[in-house]
Image (tube, grey):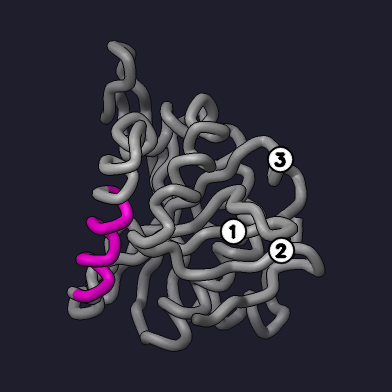
Amino acid sequence: MYAVALAEDAELRPLEPWQAEEFLEHMDRARAGVDPWIPWATRSTDLESARATLRKFADKQAADAGRIHGIWLDGTLVGGVMFVQFDAAAGVCEIGVWTEPAAQGRGLVTAAARRLLDYALLERGLYRAEWWNSTVNLRSRAVARRLGMTLDGTLRKHTEHLGVRLDLEIWSMLAPEWRAVREGAGPTEG
């Protein structure tokens, strides 16, 4: 299979159902920091449920409706990026990310998200990529900003986690904006 270098010691690779055991070990390390933001973190608590999460994304990939990739640091799965939704006909996708503490602060999520934006907006020709995050998820908001995305608005009390209603921000990047970013006419680093 393929791997894309994100740094000297890190790479982006497909994350598939046969890797459920490694994914579960990673989720056990990451769950506390991921659970409030990504619903399947709560549901991926044993080998079968971890496999089911990855199978769901494999099915989405087969239908060209989403996909999931892992980030490996020194050979250990430490995070990932995904197309939560991917609608080529409508020209819109949603990107999601997560990481465990060992990978935070290294720019790996931002580098991986750039790869997904390249794929969606440049290679596949989609027009709009979205990024949804809770207003209290400051790390996710920071990545959207580093990517040069525009804050479209806030959905007040849109989702619930452990009995608490949370506001969600929606950020976006349009294909012409991303081409300008990649050509050096906009923010790319942060």
Q: CA distance from mark 3 to mark 1?
A: 11 Å
Query: Helix or strand or loop: what does disc 2 sit on?
Result: strand
| Label drawn at residue 71 | 1
For the residues marked 2 and 3, what is the alpha-carbon distance in whole angstroms?
Answer: 12 Å
Looking at numbered disc 2 in the image, what kind of residue is underneath it?
Ala
Q: Quadrant of residue 47?
A: top left
* Closer to the camera in the image, 41 or 183: 41
Local secondary structure at mark 3: helix
Q: Are marks 2 and 1 in contact (CB under 8 Å)?
A: yes
Q: Residue 102 has which mark?
A: 3
Magenta segment, which residues? 53-62
Q: Earlier in the sequence, mark 2 or mark 3?
A: 2
Up-down relation of residue 86 to residue 33 (above or below): below
- Which numbered tag is attached to residue 39? none
Tag shown at residue 10? 2
Compared with 50, 57 (above or below) is: below
Is 116 positioned to the left or the right of 181 in the image? left
Q: Are marks 3 and 1 in contact (CB under 8 Å)?
A: no
Q: Earlier in the sequence, mark 2 or mark 1?
A: 2
Q: Is residue 56 magenta?
A: yes
Residue appearing at x 37%, y 69% in the figure: 128
The x and y percentages for residue 172 are: 43, 59
